[in-house]
Image (cartoon, rainbow, N blue to C red):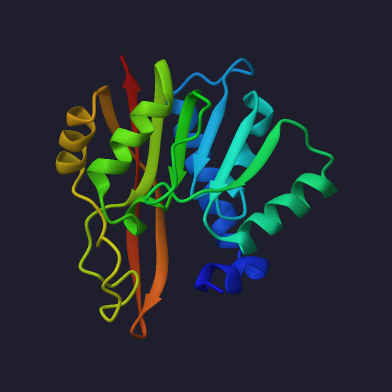
Amino acid sequence: MSEFDLKAKSWDTPSKIERAQSIADALRSKVSLSKKMSAFEYGCGTGLLSFELKDELGPITLADSSEGMLDVVRDKIKSGSVTDMKPVNLDLSKDSLPEERFDIVYTMMTLHHITDTQQILEQFHAILNTGGYLCIADLDKEDGSFHGHHVHDVHKGFDRGDLAEKATKAGFTDVVFTTAYKLTKEVEDDSQTFPIFLMAAKKG
């Protein structure tokens, strides 16, 4: 059982809900959403971002590699009598790309957990329809305080210019950034603020 499986049932704290709402607002400001758009969320967790956006999108596929997180998504879908949302267990570092193609792909606080940033951007490009959008919300470059200096299997945030170059190399155009949220958390008995960006880009 993974760390995320263990945390799944208690994941939806008020601060995480607020973060998802702010990132949803930032996404709306960069992309004109439509019920005609098919969507794919990668690293969906408990689906906080997709549930913020579901009334403005068409069918949504919610992908994660944590079965515990997906169980929470399934419970939300069932209890809310939600249609057009499909949870799938998927890890693009080892699984095949989905056969479907989508009009928008988005992630929230997932990219820093993925070892090969260039590869995942190219995979996102591959599953988008022409003219589709990629939206990534994640940490700006930081010193490792966010997860703790003992954690070595994550990226310490991202430099926006470097990530824009990688997105362009993957085939994306119209790459833009905005600060979507500022997360404050206790780090070694001190309060520290971590900006979270939203990168929006388009598949030409």
Q: Is residue 7 above or below residue 94?
A: below
Q: Position of residue 133 (x, y in %)?
A: 41, 24
- Please state if 79 lies on the left or on the right of 48 as rendered: right
Q: Quadrant of residue 145?
A: bottom left
Judge whether residue 179 can be spotted in this image.
yes
Q: Is residue 93 above or below residue 30?
A: below
Q: Position of residue 81 (x, y in %)?
A: 84, 40
- Please state if 121 lies on the left or on the right of 61 as rendered: left
- Please state if 65 lies on the left or on the right of 177 as rendered: right
Task: Say which residue appears at 61% left-offset and 60% top-offset.
Answer: 67
* Total marks in image: 0
Task: Say which residue appears at 62% left-offset and 54% top-offset.
Answer: 46
Q: Quadrant of residue 8?
A: bottom right
Judge whether residue 12 can be spotted in this image.
no
Task: Say which residue appears at 41% left-offset and 46% top-offset.
Answer: 92
The residue sitting at the bottom extreme is 189
Q: Position of residue 39 (x, y in %)?
A: 55, 29
Quarter in which the C terminus is drawn: top left
Q: Is residue 96 above or below residue 72?
A: above
Q: Position of residue 148 (x, y in %)?
A: 31, 77
Task: Say which residue appears at 30% left-offset and 64% top-offset.
Answer: 154
Q: Is residue 130 above or below residue 84?
A: above
Question: Which residue is nearer to you in this view: 199 or 202?
Answer: 202
- Please state if 31 lies on the left or on the right of 204 as rendered: right
